[in-house]
Amino acid sequence: MICIISRTMYLHQLKVRLSSPAHNLRVNRSFMLSTSTQKFSFRVLLSCINMPFKRPASTRSPSSGLSSASDSKEEIANPPKRSKVSKSPKALPNVKVYIIQAKLSPQQVVKLSALAEKHCAKLCMDVDEADVVVTAISMRRRLERHMSWDVATSKAIVTPEWLTDSVKASHALPCEDYVAVDDLRASTLKNCPDCNKSPCQCDDTDYGTPRSPVVYPSPPSSPSASTKQKILSRDKLPLKDLAEPAAASSVSIPAHLLPPPDPIPTNLEQLSYLSKYACQRASPLICPNQELAVELDILKRSRGLEGEERSALSYARAISVVKAYPHRITSKSQVQKLPHFGVKICSLVEEFLDTGEISEARSIASSERFKTLSDFSSVYGIGPNAAQKLYNLGLRTLEDLEIYYGVDPTDIETNLIKLENEEAPRGSTRRSQGQKDEPGESWIKVALGLRNDLMKKIPRTEAEEMSRIVMQELDAIEPGCVSTIVGGFRRGKPEGNDVDIVFTHPDGGMVKGLCRQLVQRLHERGMVTHVMHLSSFHGPNPLRTAHWDSLEKALTVFTLPKSSPLYTGTRRRLDLIFAHPDVYWTAVIGWSGSVMFQRDLRQWAKDKYGMKFDSSGITRRHDSKPFYPKTEKEVFELFGLEWVGPTWRNADV
């Protein structure tokens, strides 16, 4: 409140009046201060007696973090009441930070500046004084507009997330996951601030903090007794929990990359078949209503082959609920309240209960179109769209396809190895300028030429033998790797169409390029005859439109060596997946399946936690921040889910 007439004069007169005994209990109204616009009561004036004059605002820069000597003395002489509260220690007391505001919003600049002022040694106004430069710039040419390249190479150039995450962790985090400019990666890692704790206790166990790859040195002697015991005891584990370390490795394998000594039990009482998410239900390999699930599966596959994806997904969801229903369905009323059961599917269930079959499913299963499309889409490289095109051309059998594609058995037997170029995944098509989409003919020819072998089921014992042989060859290239057989075998199936194996190495730097080396070695020894698809690691997408792929994959045709007791000369489909150790268990979960279990796990992560989950890792959607669970169970814990063992994830037929 600003008074027009000097407040000091009126306060002095008021004090004189109040000192008189006659005015101890009352105050003459003539001493009430009046202005042309407002009157002030005695109570307001009385409160002004002890009110100090307002000190002018400091002229120092809010970002300088400096104060004048007079201000300091005045603050000491008249400390505010809140000064009694102890000040929290700085998270980065030895780090000087400079912030480049380009490409940052005003809100980001304010937030980062406040963090730097509060938690760092200094928020620098001159880049030369700083230890760390925080910037959202990722291009060298753009960065050189704000600082010289010589200065940049002498600093740690990091993204804004480094500052926010370091403050959250209360210590300076490693810079490896926060390098802003790729050209400055080496100098940034060299100049990255050390942890300010002594002794250093920067090992971060929080899910939310990215961790740098851990390097495990190879000891000169054999593995420790505890490691040996884990390796020897693995043979007692069921295949669904089998992780294969290299048998004669001299590399110490950390415990979190090995399966638990005893399989983790699934608490079925904590899972509910009424949940709309398959990742919250227990789905056995064979359920009490398996015949109903098979009938619905025919309808699902038919919709998928005809390109009706939404309808196919509706049937897939209903099937996943049937697989988890623990009782024999005997009436329509039992399914009316189940999730994903609409009027149409309830009527189909009622028909099945009355007649023992679904007439639409039987009609579809016996139709020539369904049989033909199913056969065509079973060939590697032919998806539903390509199958429909081939059917419309008048082709009806696999023999017709062989003639159409000009399959020559002599050419097929010649080794087809593709190590130079990455290939597109199954079902995709290539587009050349001026041409229509065409299937990858080289894959289709191989699949057709080898179809008599590739269509034979692979027994579990042969899958284990394939894994043993591959691990033996991998150990000769890089000792210390571990692996897990995934896919249907891990979910308890006695046989399968192919074998999928996920690999990793305790030293993340050793994983890159290992897939290609292994495929080359297996090919040289006559075990891998064809490579359908070979991909490498892909770096983070700058636009954050897609997950960065932390997996290397090779989809191959494999045959056991003649030295193996299970050798028959039969060619098998073998998929090799190499993952960084930080995402090993997310890769294992993703490749273990089933399809609907994985789909609902991704949907749950998105709906409930705003996260993105797939086999290549876990990230937060709004800022692409990665999360690194150390075990398979921790993935479920991260999403707040009850543990579901692999044999209870059979949400598909």
Image: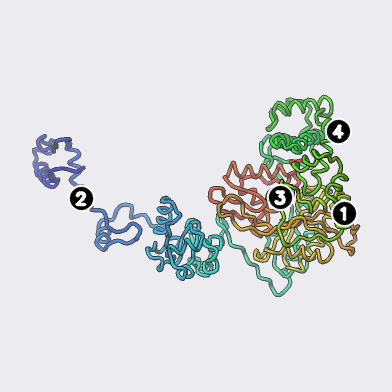
Residue picked out by circle 3: 430
In the picture, the disc for residue 366 is 4
Rounded to the nearest whole Å, what is the CA distance between mark 3 and mark 4? 33 Å
- What residue is at 76 percent from the left and 38 percent from the top? 305
Mark 2: secondary structure:
loop
Spot occupied by residue 104 in the image (x, y as percentages of width and height): 45, 54
Amino acid type of disc 4?
Ser
In the picture, the disc for residue 53 is 2
The answer to which of 548 and 116 lies nearer the viewer is 548
The answer to whether mark 1 and mark 3 are in CB contact below 8 A is no
**Res. 560 image quadrant:** bottom right
Q: Earlier in the sequence, mark 1 or mark 3?
A: 1
The answer to which of 121 and 375 lies nearer the viewer is 375
Q: Nearer the viewer, mark 3 or mark 2?
A: 3
The answer to whether mark 4 and mark 1 are in CB contact below 8 A is no
**Res. 289 image quadrant:** top right
